[in-house]
Image: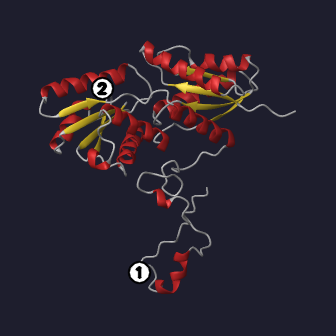
């Protein structure tokens, strides 16, 4: 008899916005529909039902003993680093005999970057399809904002990866709560940098109070700056890419393959403008001043290398 695969538990932030909470619950149901072989359940850390504990109980009642938990979050802040592990530890005490692995947050993954790029194209009315068209478009990527510097830094990383190879004039970063710069300050910065067309892009999975606030603040700023064209893009939403990425995080968690920053590694992933680097063997990097006799090591650059430090085979 084969052991059934571990169930999938989706952990969400929670929101006071009923439409946002329903979007999450809908997404969890969709994952279940697409993967009938897996028991799938989802719950929230705070603010909206069902709580994460209820989702675990639901799985246990369905006979589940092992599951993989995936945080449906773009960045790893307090929730993903502290609250979810604490909640899962509590559930393990409440349900002796269950075991689980914990996956990593979603972003900034190339699949999500391609959805963000699509949202920008939609906001621009399809007029900015090529780098030449995009050269006068400045993007303001707006994250949730956190008291955790590492989480805020992840939003900057997403902004940089979105800019690489896509031809926008620039991708600036702002936050809707808890961190500077706020949305108006981010827009001021774009203007000071000479932006004539700005698209404000919410770095959020689903609709909710915070993405709505981003849009309201954007509209307020735009009204005060009629000389600059300002558009608002949509949230990421329950796209097929998001379904695929959650399943990728599930597989990683099940296999215990929690990797370093390989999602955005040019040697593994075809990033825009760097497609030719995928699969290249990694060479040791010699500087002329390393040891004074680098000339005799020319053969290293033809791929005849032993223990290469940057192998990316992990």
According to the picture, the residue beneath numbered tag 1 turns out to be: 288
Give the answer, above or below, for where 18 lies relative to 101. Answer: above
Please tell me which residue is depicted at 59% across the width and 20% down the height of the picture: 29
Question: Which quarter of the image is occupied by the C terminus?
Answer: bottom right
Which x, y percent locates residue 212? Answer: 33, 21
Mark 2 or 1, nearer chain start: 2
Give the answer, above or below, for where 205 lies relative to 20. Answer: below
Mark 1 neighbour density, 10 Å: few (under 14) some (14–19) many (20 or more)? few
Question: Which quarter of the image is occupied by the N terminus?
Answer: top right
Element on which disc 2 rests: helix
Give the answer, above or below, for where 282 lies relative to 115. Answer: below
Is 164 placed left or right of 269 in the picture?
left
Q: What separation in Å lies between label 2 and label 1 (alpha carbons)?
A: 51 Å
**Is residue 270 something that shows in the picture?**
yes
Colouring scheme applied when the structure was drawn: secondary structure
**Is residue 175 something that shows in the picture?**
no
Q: Between residues 110 and 258, which one lies in front from this camera angle?
A: 110
According to the picture, the residue beneath numbered tag 2 turns out to be: 214
The answer to which quarter of the image holds residue 143 is top left
The answer to which quarter of the image holds residue 39 is top right
Element on which disc 1 rests: loop
Mark 2 neighbour density, 10 Å: few (under 14) some (14–19) many (20 or more)? many
Which x, y percent locates residue 243? Answer: 56, 31
In contact (CB < 8 Å): disc 2 and disc 1 = no
Please tell me which residue is depicted at 16% across the width and 34% down the height of the picture: 228
The answer to which quarter of the image holds residue 149 is top left
Please tell me which residue is depicted at 29% across the width and 24% down the height of the picture: 215
Please tell me which residue is depicted at 27% across the width and 45% down the height of the picture: 133
Which x, y percent locates residue 129? Answer: 33, 42
């Amino acid at each position: 008899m084969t052991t059934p695969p571990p169930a999938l538990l989706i952990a969400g932030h929670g929101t006071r916005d009923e439409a946002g909470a329903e979007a999450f619950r809908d997404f969890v149901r969709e994952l279940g529909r697409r993967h009938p072989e897996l028991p799938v359940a989802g719950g929230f850390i705070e603010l909206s039902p069902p709580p994460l504990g209820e989702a675990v109980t639901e799985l246990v009642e369905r006979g589940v003993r092992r599951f993989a938990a995936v945080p449906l979050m773009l960045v790893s802040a307090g929730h993903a680093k502290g609250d979810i592990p604490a909640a899962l530890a509590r559930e393990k005490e409440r349900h002796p005999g269950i075991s689980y692995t914990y996956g990593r947050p979603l972003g900034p993954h190339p699949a999500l970057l391609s959805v963000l790029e699509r949202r920008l194209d939609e906001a621009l009315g399809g007029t900015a399809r090529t780098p030449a068209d995009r050269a006068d478009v400045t993007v303001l990527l707006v994250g949730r904002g956190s008291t955790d510097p590492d989480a805020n830094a992840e939003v900057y990383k997403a902004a940089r990866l979105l800019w690489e190879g896509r031809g926008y004039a620039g991708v600036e970063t702002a936050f809707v709560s808890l961190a500077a710069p706020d949305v108006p300050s981010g827009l001021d910065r774009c203007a000071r940098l000479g932006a004539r067309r700005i698209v404000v892009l919410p770095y959020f999975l689903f609709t909710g109070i915070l993405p709505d606030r981003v849009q309201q603040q954007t509209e307020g700023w735009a009204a005060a700056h009629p000389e600059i064209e300002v558009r608002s893009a949509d949230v990421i939403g329950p796209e097929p890419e998001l379904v695929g990425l959650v399943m990728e995080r599930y597989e990683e968690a099940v296999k215990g393959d929690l990797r370093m920053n390989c999602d955005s590694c040019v040697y593994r992933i075809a990033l825009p403008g760097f497609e030719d680097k995928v699969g290249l063997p990694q060479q040791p990097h010699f500087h002329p001043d390393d040891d004074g006799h680098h000339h005799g090591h020319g053969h290293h650059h033809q791929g005849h290398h032993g223990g290469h430090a940057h192998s990316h085979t992990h």
